[in-house]
Amino acid sequence: MTDGVSAKQERREADLLERVVRSFDDCPDPRLRQLMTALVRHLHAFAREVRLTEEEWARGIEFLTATGHITDDRRQEFILLSDVLGLSMQTIAINNEAYGDATEATVFGPFFVENSPEIPTGGDISAGANGEPCWVDGTVSDSEGNPVTGARIEVWEADEDGFYDVQYDDDRVAARAHLFTDAQGRYSFWGVTPTPYPIPHDGPVGEMLAAVGRSPMRASHLHFMVSAEGHRTLVTHIFVRGDRQLDSDTVFGVKESLVKDFERQAPGTPTPDGRSVHGPWSRVAFHIVLAPAGT
Ligand code: BEZ
Ligand code: FE
């Protein structure tokens, strides 16, 4: 029984809920019926638990309206909302059950772009993006340790100013590319050392974060999407060990297994491919294990 609510009032509220739930009885699609009735039950439970006022619900509708208005084909505020509420990561957890030592998945984020340029093994994804050079290498294998040849690896990241190419007002394509693993399942490329950056916070989601005293910052990371026939597609990032934001990533994306050592190299340290780099650079190894498709 809800505190301070009479038995008669409780019954009125429960009766209304039951009527709404029954309104879906004739839904021909059982899954849709399950989704809609569960959603209604949880929404009513929320309103009843907090004794939602009419002013608060009006404010909620205003917030959702603003979230819709700022959303277009370049900005998706609803995904951002799902991310900061932890719902994106919860959906990922439900749909990517741990499989042996397969690499863990994390949030996709809004900055992936189809048709990225292809680079060869050892190529450079930065294409002029600002940042300290970073050498990334590793392997892709299956859960039995066999190398996966020809796996497609998409990589994308923000520049050192915290912006993805698509956040600039020009048509640049930078700090994103794809490449394929070689016959031994190996890959390598140059990118830039990841730095922390805020999610877009000039809209209703940012306003909500400010109102509740939460930071919009994400932990420094480099995005990967790895696909190969017969394997579950992996969407993940690697994070930088020692980064101050690891414990407060605003989209809850950090998993310990994805935190890697980005080893800082002094100026003049020979590079793995003989490239000459002025100033410091970093290197990181990321060995990826794919789960079988359908798991
Ligand atoms: C990102 O990784 O870039 C990102 C992820 C979730 C929300 C906003 C940004
Ligand atoms: Fe990102």
Image (spheres, rainbow, N blue to C red):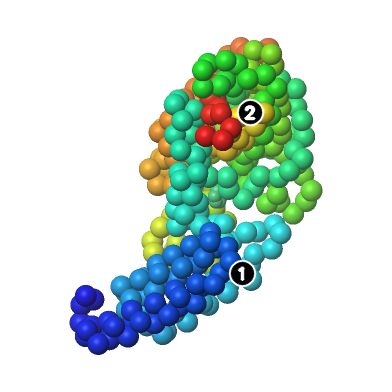
Pick the front one: 8 or 61: 8
Inspect this view and state whether residue 264 appears. no
Quarter occupied by the N terminus: bottom left
Residue lying at the far bottom of the rendered structure: 8
Number of marks: 2
Is disc 2 in contact with disc 1, using a CB cutoff of under 8 Å? Answer: no
Q: Quadrant of residue 223?
A: top right
How far apart are the two marked residues, 2 and 1, measured between alpha carbons?
38 Å
Mark 1 sits near ligand 1, with its Cβ under 8 Å away: no
Identify residue type, mark 1.
Gly
Residue holding disc 2: 230
Residue at 21% from the left image edge and 85% from the top image edge: 6
**Quick one: SS at disc 1?**
helix
Q: Earlier in the sequence, mark 2 or mark 1?
A: 1
| Left or right of 53 in this view: 285 | right
In the picture, measured across the screen, residue 197 lies left or right of residue 191, that is left
Few, some or many residues within 10 Å of mark 2 (<14, 14–19, 20+)? few
Residue shown at the point (44%, 71%) measured from the top left: 40
Q: Give how far across and how far down residue 209 sits, in percent.
A: 45, 62
| Residue drawn at point x = 57 percent, y = 45 percent | 108
The disc labelled 2 sits on which kind of residue?
A: Gly
Please state if 290 lies on the left or on the right of 183 as rendered. left
User: Pointer 1: what residue?
Assistant: 68
Depicted 262 relative to depicted 50: above or below:
above
Image coordinates of residue 155 in percent, x first then y, are 65, 34
Element type where label 2 sits in the image:
loop
Q: Which residue does the image show at 42% across and 43% down from the upper left?
A: 245
Residue 254's x, y, as percent? 44, 40
Percent position of residue 116, x then y? 75, 38
For the residue pair 56 and 194, the one nearer the viewer reads as: 56
